[in-house]
């Protein structure tokens, strides 16, 4: 978790230097990303909040993910991940939003969507980026890897923009 804290603190600094705010939408990580962010003193100036949308219903009702998108692509998909981030950004009024959706395991995987499949997305006014990952750890390791990948994507956007 120490490396996550270091990444979160770098994100706080980068957001602050650019006067940007952040919101999160999490599914398979169950609030882990929000927890890591709120471990950083002073981040309340940048981090506005997050939604844990573990169920499809929560994705629809709390983040505005269209039901048709979930039906057509599944909750664990690039399309739904981006829609989750869009919904969080809109609802919190943040400059940026990140989202995570995946199958942490040990159950829930299929041949086409195995355990460990995860998508992370970042959105702002200009761009929507999404990345696909296939983790091979246990549930806890997959959740940690997903949160780390999301922070790394955020830092890539902030530090290399």
Image (spheres, rainbow, N blue to C red):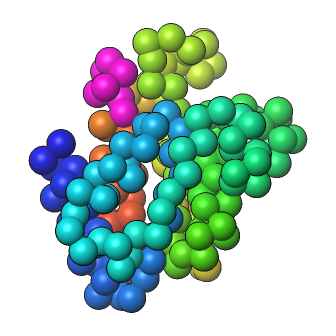
Reply above or below: 54 against 43: above
Return the residue found at the far left: 2
Residue located 43% across and 12% down the image: 106
Residue located 43% across and 30% down the image: 134
Q: Is residue 142 magenta?
A: yes
Q: Nearer the viewer, residue 97 or 113?
A: 97
Q: Nearer the viewer, residue 143 or 73?
A: 143
Main secondary structure found in the magenta portion: helix
Reply above or below: 44 against 60: below
Residue located 67% across and 60% down the image: 87
Residue located 46% across and 37% down the image: 30
Where residue 128 appears, as percent x and y from the top left, is 60, 65
Left or right side of 28 for 3: left
What range of the chain is rendered magenta?
136-143
User: Which quarter of the picture shows residue 68?
Assistant: top right
Where residue 77 appears, as percent x and y from the top left, is 64, 38
Where residue 34 appears, as percent x and y from the top left, is 39, 53
Q: Can residue 149 be seen at all in this image of the molecule?
A: no
Reply above or below: 40 against 112: below
Q: Can residue 154 be seen at all in this image of the molecule?
A: yes
Reply above or below: 104 against 86: above
């Amino acid at each position: 978790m120490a490396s996550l804290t270091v990444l979160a603190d770098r994100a706080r600094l980068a957001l602050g230097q650019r006067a940007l705010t952040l919101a999160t939408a999490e599914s398979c990580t169950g609030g882990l990303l929000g927890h890591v962010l709120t471990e950083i003193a002073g981040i309340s100036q940048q981090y506005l909040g997050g939604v844990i949308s573990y169920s499809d219903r929560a994705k629809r009702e709390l983040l505005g993910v269209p039901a048709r998108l979930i039906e057509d692509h599944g909750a664990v998909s690039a399309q739904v991940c981006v829609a989750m981030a869009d919904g969080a950004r809109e609802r919190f009024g943040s400059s940026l939003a990140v989202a995570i959706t995946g199958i942490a395991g040990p159950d829930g995987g299929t041949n086409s969507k195995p355990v460990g499949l995860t998508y992370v997305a970042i959105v702002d006014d200009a761009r929507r980026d999404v990345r696909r990952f296939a983790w091979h750890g246990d549930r806890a390791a997959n959740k940690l890897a997903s949160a780390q990948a999301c922070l790394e994507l955020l830092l890539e956007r902030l530090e290399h923009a």
